[in-house]
Image (tube, rainbow, N blue to C red):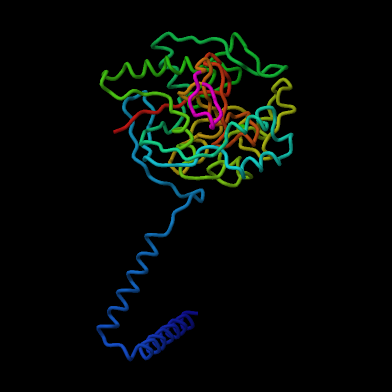
Amino acid sequence: MRDKNLNSDWYWKMKMFNKVIWVNSLLAFLTIEEKMRLIIALLFTFLICVFASPRSWAGDQRTELKQFKECDVCSEMVVLPSGVFWMGASEDDVRLIEKADSSLLGNLLNRSTISRETPRHQVKVKSFAIAKYPITVEQFSIFARETKFEGKGCNALHPNGQNRDDEADWHNPWFKQSNNEPVVCVSWNDAQKYILWLNSKFPESHAKYRLPTEAEWEYAARAGTTTPAYWGDASQQCKFANAGDRATKSVDFSGYNTNASIADCDDGFATTSPVGAFPPNPWGLYDMLGNAKQWINECGLTNYTSGHLSTNCARRTERGAAWSMVPSSVRAASRFDAPATLRSMGLGFRLAIDVN
Ligand SMILES: [Ca+2]
């Protein structure tokens, strides 16, 4: 075997030598100086092709961005670059959703709700930092302990659907949670109390932690992608996000989910999952879609044609997708709103902060 390999090695060496002789005879009319120039030009072209080839998200390519964490209870923050992106659902997205079987739309999405995601339009976003993960039960419990926060009453699952349960709260949102799962059953007003408490730990001159704006949130969730969800192929949802799936149906929800639409796969979690349990998006942000929806700084929704800001501040915008949501809602463009006082078992928040 060894001799055979040796012979084979010599065979290839002789073949390469013959090729060199052949190429050399083709270039015989060139001077040595011209041959050197040709080699340098070919080398230069090769280097340009290697380093200037476009990079696209293929599920395992990530842009490394600067990160920081300012205190023990603070979130890890990722600094996003400034940029321009297309915000909202494209006409293709709308057509796909409209064509979907009506059973997939559930009661959370219909033609009137998707119309508020259009028209898709370009938005410029300044550089800012956004939390790598949503605020967790553990983070919120430190705030609750220090400020004696209670916050009882949350929309929980009951036989007739999601109704207010006066006993449910962030500590006991009807289902069991570990410390590393996103806090839910917190209203927009509760999130503001948390933010006030966190900012009180820093000097007055320090930049203020806050909720992201709607444009900042979608810019972060898309992370340079233009598909409905950053992973592209909708059939891959269970690999990338914790949303309504077979696992959701596996739990007794007192009938609530019996008729709810789900992804036909198993993501492994019936309710909330630990933050970071699924792959991050291309900018290293976890749980942007799935697990818990997130409160946005802005007032209630308006149509994009009438501007982003609403004066209806009794309601506040929510983005993302909750663990119980139908597949057609697990998209970066999905928009929702709710009373600022609402506490829901699928709704939490993550922080943002200005950077210089
Ligand atoms: Ca799930």
For the point 71% across and 40% down, which residue is it?
Answer: 100
Farthest front residue? Answer: 306
For this view, does 212 lie left or right of residue 291?
left
Looking at the image, residue 47 lies above or below residue 55 = below
Q: Main secondary structure of the magenta part?
A: loop
Indicate which quadrant contains ligand 1: top right
Percent of width and height locating residue 252? 70, 23
Task: Give the residues drawn in magenta, as a range.
Answer: 300-311
- In the rendered image, residue 202, in percent from the top left (x then y), is placed at 29, 20
Q: Nearer the viewer, residue 90 or 137?
A: 90
Number of numbered discs on residues? 0
- State the image quarter where residue 14 is shown: bottom left
- Is residue 292 in the magenta section? no
Q: Quadrant of residue 159?
A: top right
Image coordinates of residue 171 in percent, x first then y, are 52, 16
Q: Residue at x 43, y 28 (%)?
A: 212
- Please provide percent x and percent y for residue 98: 69, 39
Relative to residue 306, is residue 200 drawn left or right?
left
Q: Residue at x 42, y 59 (%)?
A: 53
